[in-house]
Image: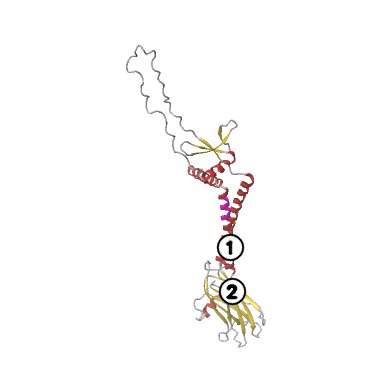
Amino acid sequence: MSDEDAAAASEEITADADQDEAAEALTLEQRQEELKKSRWNVFLWLGIAVLMFSFALFPMPFSADYDNFTNSAEKDIGFVWGPSLPGDDLFDASMNLDVTASSPPPESGSLIEAYALKVDNCQQNLGEFTVIAKNGTDHAYQHQIMDKTPITGQEYTFEFSLDPGQYCIIVQYVDANGDINSNPNNDLAVSGKVWSSQTIGGLLGIICLSLSAFAFIGAQKHGAHIKTILEKGDESTEEKVLASISGARIASGPTGAPPGDGPSGPPPSTGPSGPPSPSESAPTETVPTDTTPAPAAEAVFEPAENGYFFKKLPDGSYDQTVYVQNADGSYAPHQG
């Protein structure tokens, strides 16, 4: 491993450690707030996932009636959209055509065929596109035909997979040779459904469902830590005392030591101005004045919760260490 790789690995470990320390530094109230947010995220992403899956499963319906002039049922189904690439692939939009043979041809060998043609104008002559569809050389033009003679009143389903684009569908009766059956008594009904949104809605639903799962895991972690704090008192004594101090900072006293009350200079001399006279038996006694400066202010230990003390310094600030009182009245730092 090179020095750069070792440095990168060390930075990642340090970052993970910092995240763990930040997570451990959260108080009980902060963890409860994070738990509430995680639970809301679970419901939020889960609700969006349900909407996306519903959107994906909701089809676009359409219908077409038989026209005796064209001897077929034709319909412009509009634009089919999706993320699919040209050609047959997993992301194609599904389309189902349910054809009811209301009055099929009486001739034997008659069949039903269906086309899905990717054209912009369904009013034009579609003959050339039906030929391409029968050849099966282009996924944009598709053709399917039944393999059995239709029975009156029976419903038959054709399933197509479409690329994005504008489509027309054609359903008609053909004879055994594949030519259009133009019997004037022929009739059929077509009802179809296109699932244009199944791919996009499904992918978005899976993403939202994954985010909901991650939020649920985070909520479980916060809940487990809160349970540990409540059952075992995992929050340290220092955190409890410092939290109580930071919540309501006590108004401090003077910011410096009190001024000294000693004399400002030496006492005045009260002795005689000359030598004593013979009548004076003793000199006058002079009373000395105490010039010792006042002692400096000392730190004060103020009581906190649960028998603990915090140390107030002479400048009014507080020491961040928590103290306990010994049996002899002295104070010592608390060992967590």
Q: Which residues are magenta?
A: 31-37
> Colour mode?
secondary structure
Which residue in the structure is indicated by mark 1? 47
Q: Nearer the viewer, residue 216 or 262?
A: 262
Q: Amino acid at mark 2?
A: Lys
Compared with 18, 194 (above or below) is below
Name the mark on residue 158.
none
Q: In the image as oriented, which residue stretches furthest toward the left?
A: 274
Residue 199: percent from left, percent from top:
56, 66
Q: Earlier in the sequence, mark 1 or mark 2?
A: 1
Instruction: Provide the residue designation for mark 2.
Output: 193
Residue found farthest to the bottom: 184
Q: With 122 as the anchor, is 99 left or right in this view? A: right
Secondary structure beneath dot 2 equals strand
- Alpha-carbon neighbours of circle 1 within 10 Å: few (<14), some, or many (≥20)? some
> Looking at numbered disc 1 in the image, what kind of residue is underneath it?
Gly
Q: Is residue 202 above or below residue 21?
A: below
* Count of labels in the image: 2
Label 1 and label 2: CA atoms lie apart by: 26 Å
Q: Where's the C terminus, which quadrant?
A: top right
**Viewer-nearest of discs 1 and 2:** 1
Quadrant position of residue 262 = top left
Relative depth, front residue between 220 and 137: 220
- Residue 292: image location, x then y, percent: 43, 26
